[in-house]
Amino acid sequence: MSCSLTMKNISAARNGVTLYNGITLNLSHKEKIAIIGPNGCGKTTLLEMIAGLSLPQSGLLELFHRPMRSLDDFKTVRTMIGYLFQDSDNQFLAPIVEDDVAFSLLAQGISKEEAALKTAMMLQDLGIAHLAKKVVYHLSGGEKKLVALAGVLIAEPKLMLLDEPTNGLDNAMQQKLVAILRKIDKSIIIVSHHREFLESIVDKIYTMTQEGLHGTFNASNPQKSYIWRTYDGHETTL
Amino acid sequence: MDQTSHPPITPCVALLLALVYGCTIALQTHMYVSMSLILFFLAWLKRRFLLIIFKRLVMLNTLIVFIALTLYWQHQEHLAGLMLLRSNLMLLCILLLFHGCNEFTIAIAMQRLALPHKITTLFFFTSKSIFLIRHELVLFKNTLRIRGFTPKTDLLSYKTLAGFIGTLVIKALERSVALQKAMLLRGFQGEIYTLSRRQSLSSNDAIATLLTLISLFWHQGYLL
C-alpha cells in the first residue's frame, strides 16, 4: 500500500525548548490515525509541519513520496493537503458560507457554475445546505466546524489534518462529525484529547511523548467499509 | 443573518457615487441647499435605518465639531461652517450609501471596478480583523464585568487597561498569523471570490446617479 506520509527521526523545538526527538511515522493511503498527548507536547506543531507551515529541526519528511526539504517543496503538494483549524474562525476567508466553501475551487480557477454546483452538493452531503447564505461569524460552534470541514473537503485533498475537531461541540454534533469522518475515504490524521471520539473513527491511535510516537491499533473501530458520495452523484463502497 | 437581499443601490454604483460626490463636495468653496438633493433620495431608500444612521453621524461629528469650533474661535467663521457642512454632507452620503453593506460586498465591488487586488484584499482582511478584534474586545469587557471589575482612577484600573490593550495587540498578532496560515493552506492567490452573481443595475441606480449630478452641478439656495 502506498504511503501518503513518511516521517523519519523528526525533531522539533518551540522557543528553544525541544518538544520531541525522533518522531517516526508512516501513514498509508486512506489510513486514519489519531495522535493524542498532553497539552503543549507539540501535536499541533507536528500537524503544521506536515502541512508545510513550518519545517522540522531535523529528520526526513516525505509527502506522497516526495521529500520536503524546504517550505517551497510543499507548493507542489499543497492542494493535496486539507487542514482543519482548531479555531474555525481562523479558517474562514469569506464571510458567506457558500463563498467560503467554494474559495479553494475558485482559487484553483474552476468556473463559478461548477464551483457553485460542487458547493451545493458538499453542503447537502454534510447536512448544512440551509446555511449556504448565512454569515459564518453568526453560526454556532458546531455549524462553524462543519462549514470549515466543507471548505476542506471540497478541495478533495488526499491527506486531511484535523486539529481538535471536537473542540466546543456538543454530543449530537460530535456524533454527526463521527458519521461524516467515517464516510470519508482519505488519509486522515486527527489530533484530539477526545479518546471516545477517536476510537470510533481511526484505525490506530498514537500517543505523543518527548521520545516519539507510540502507536496502538484501535480494536474498537467498527468501520468495515467506506461509502463516499462522489460529485457525479454515485456512491462508492471500498 | 441571511445575505440573500440586495442593497437598494448596487455596490459598484454606490462606490462610484461616493467617490464623485465626496471629491466634488470636498473641493467646493460655496455651499448650496441643492447639494443635499441626493441625500433626500438616499434617506428615503434607507428610511427604516435613518435613526441608526443619524446616531452614527452624531458620533462621527464629535471630532468634526471640535475642529470647527477651533476654527470659529480663530475668527475663521466661513471656513468653520464650510468644513462642518462639507464633512457632514460627505459622511451622510457615505453612511446612507453603504449602510447594510458588509465589508465583503464592498471589497467585491472594488474588485469589479478593477481596483488592484492588493487594495481590495487588504481592505477586506483589515475589516475582517477589525471585526474579530472587536469580538475579543466584547469578550474582555464581559470578563471584566463578570469578575467584578469597576474602573476607577487607581493603579489597578490603569494596569488592567494596559494589560487589556497588550492582550488585544497579541490577539491581533495571533489572528494575523492564523490568517496567513489559512491563506497558505487554502490556496489564496491574492484575490477574493464570490459565487453570487453580479447585481444588475436598477432604476434606483439611475435615479441616484442623476440626482448626484444635479446635486453637484445645479447650484440653488445659497447657504455659505
Image: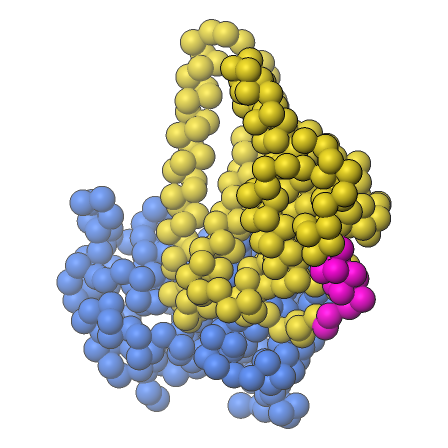
Chain colours: A blue, B yellow
Residue B115, percent across and down?
A: 48, 64
Q: Answer left or right for B3 relative to A56.
A: right
Residue A60, percent across and down?
A: 18, 71
Residue B35, percent across and down?
A: 72, 44
Q: Answer left or right for B19 relative to B184.
A: right
Q: Quadrant of residue B61?
A: top right
Q: Quadrant of residue B194?
A: bottom right
Which residue is rendered at x = 63% and y = 79% of the image? A116
Which residue is rendered at x = 31% and y = 62% of the image? A53
A128 or B64, which lies in front? B64
Q: Answer left or right for A196 relative to A68.
A: right
Q: Quadrant of residue A43?
A: bottom left
**Relative height, residue A223 to residue B58 (above, below):** below
A235 or A88, which lies in front? A88
**Relative height, residue A214 to residue A170 (above, below):** below
B21 or A115, which lies in front? B21
Which residue is rendered at x = 20% and y = 69% of the image? A70
Res B162 seen here = yes
Which region shows up in magenta? B200-211
Q: How many numbered marks have been drawn onto this rendered protein structure?
A: 0
Residue B160, percent across and down?
A: 45, 19
Q: Is residue A11 magenta?
A: no
**Relative height, residue B109 to residue B195 (above, below):** above
Which residue occupies the extreme left position in the image? A58
The quadrant the N terminus of chain A occupies is bottom left
**Relative height, residue A218 to residue B136 (above, below):** below
Q: Answer left or right for A208 relative to B172.
A: left
Magenta stretch: dominant SS?
helix
Res A31 seen here = no
B77 or B155, which lies in front? B77
